[in-house]
Amino acid sequence: MLKTFVQFMLVMIICPFALSGQTKEIANPPSWFWGCWVVSKPLPTPGISGISPDQVKAIIGARIVYQPKHARSGHRVAPSPEYTVTVLSGQDFLSLGYVRLNQIGIDGDKVTRIQLINPQLSDLEFPGNDVFLRKADIVIEVENTYFAARRAKVQDVGCKSEETEGK
């Protein structure tokens, strides 16, 4: 009887992780991700935001540059960044902030998440360190507030970075 109970408890503990763990790591961000992005607007989502309306306004228009050896958000630079890339199920995404994929404009049941790993900078100091890929643009998350970002124009002077200035 005790053996059966222990087996039952193991199944109850392990199964939820096996079923919900549909997160899949990928080696590198897709090539179209690299470059400069302009934060264009906040996305209307439910839940409690961790930032003020003034902070939202300050993020709108920010230029975010992602390169394999350099990242910049506004005037904040992350030299030698590390990126992690995972594919999240809709359920895993929902568990992050109680927002559904369709609420940020993603049709389907999976999303690619790119995270900039830099322990010295929080997401308030470096908006754009948590990114979700859509078909033609990206969504960044800052303190449970989601923003759309579009590709910057080629000659956008706000997109100059250490890597591009010398070229």
Image (cartoon, grey):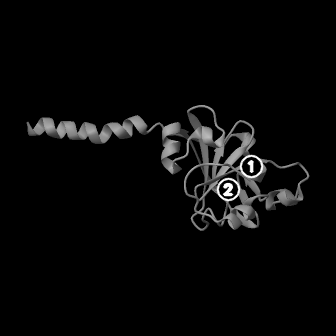
The CA distance from mark 2 to mark 1 is: 9 Å
Depth check, front residue: 58 or 158: 58
Q: Amino acid at mark 1?
A: Ala
Please name which of the two marks, 2 or 1, marks the residue nearer to the observer: 1
Q: Residue at x 62, y 64 (%)?
A: 51
Looking at the figure, which quarter contains the C terminus?
bottom right
Vertical side of 57 occupied by 34: above or below: above
Q: Is residue 100 or residue 128 the one in the foreground?
A: 100
**Residue type for callout 2:** Gly
- The residue under the point 70% across, 45% down is 138
Outermost residue on the left side: it is 1
In percent of width and height, residue 74 lies at 76, 63
Q: Which residue is mark 1?
A: 149
Crowd class of label 2 (few under 14; some 14 to 19; many from 20; radius 10 Å): many
Please indicate whether residue 137 sits to the left or right of residue 91 in the image: right
Which label's residue is closer to the chain start, 2 or 1?
2
